[in-house]
Image (cartoon, helix red, strand yellow):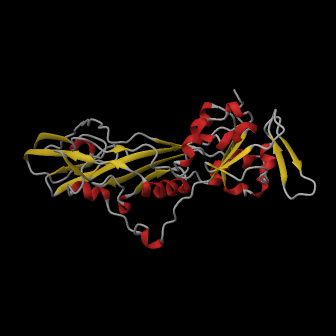
Amino acid sequence: MVGADVAVGPAIATRTDSTGAFELRNVPVGSRVLLVRRLGYAPLVSLWDVGTVPLVLDLRVQAFPTVLPAVHVTESTAQPYDARLAGFNKRRAEKLGYYITKSDIARGNTFRMTDALQRIPGVRVVTMPGELGTSVTLPGSRCSPLVILDGFPAALGRFDLNMIDLSTVEGVEVYPYGSAVPAELMGPFGTEGCGVIAIWSRPMRPTVRADQLPPEHPVNLDSLVKADAVYTAETVDVPVRYVQGTAAPMYPDSLFRAGVAGHVVARFVVDTAGAVEPRSVDIESATLPAFGQAVREALRSATFTPARVGGAVVRQLVEMPFEFHPAKADSVANRP
């Protein structure tokens, strides 16, 4: 085990090397208590009789489940949480209609909404003579569909979809037949009869001012543990629990487009309110710096259920892995 703290009393201490070996010198003769500690393992306390002949010890420690479950990051999950998109993601998973994601738009090198929509079989786009803009009809219909923007119906009648900047679009869902439109997307007075095109804008990630960023010099986590300033999983009654979906790292665009996967392990302190203490974030390992920075930024908004000891909430040091997987190419879902 690498990096374990080994001590006989407060004055004689060392740390295991890359092979898990250690050496303690000048230990007084007699019965001595040896303490071995490392985050992720139960402390090992043993009594040894020290004489004039060096002792060769074979120590085994028990792993303790201090590591939180891994967060898996793909293009579709690497976005700030936005309640507006919950329904879109649910319907897309159920394949109730046709769906276009921002990844589809990027891969298709598409610049106009009507070009993106023409990927759907049967969609007709007509430039209206004597008018500005275009007209879109869906399969099996000769009238203009209802357009919904972020959950609200746009103006009734023809709507120039090319007025929408594709760089602001998170996803599009299309229902060609009024009978197939989900209840939550139906328009007033049956206006969904010619089908529905629902467009969802990208969620906004709040910016962080320079004075809100953590200091350049983070706290020493090992020192906090040694000083009993924070708890670890083996010393609490109820350990920290991660609130799913609150830590959503942004997949670095260049790495996602290149299909590069990555792995990050972060250590940090969760305070008594369930938030990450910014100065405590330590990127223990990262396959690439960009992945580590993405995790560091995401942890600012992460939420946890705090640890408890004897019914009281306490600070706990935790370790959390993040796995970055480029999502498989999205495709327009077939209508059932």
Left or right: residue 40 versus residue 200 is: left
Q: Nearer the viewer, residue 185 or 162?
A: 185
Please report the residue visible at 40 percent of the width from the left and 56 percent of the height from the top: 282
The quarter in which the C terminus is drawn is top right
User: With respect to residue 14, does 50 lie above or below?
Assistant: above
Q: Which residue in the rendered view is the most extreme toward the front?
A: 189
Rendered location of residue 45, percent (x, y)? 16, 41
The quarter in which the N terminus is drawn is top left
User: With respect to residue 22, does 279 lie above or below?
Assistant: below
User: With respect to residue 40, does 288 lie above or below?
Assistant: below
Left or right: residue 192 versus residue 261 is: right
Count of numbered circles in the view: 0
Rendered location of residue 12, percent (x, y)? 17, 55
Q: Which residue in the rendered view is the most extreme toward the bottom?
A: 211
Please report the residue visible at 15 percent of the width from the left and 56 percent of the height from the top: 10
Residue 174 visible in the current orientation: no
Please report the residue visible at 73 percent of the width from the left and 33 percent of the height from the top: 177
Left or right: residue 273 versus residue 180 is: left
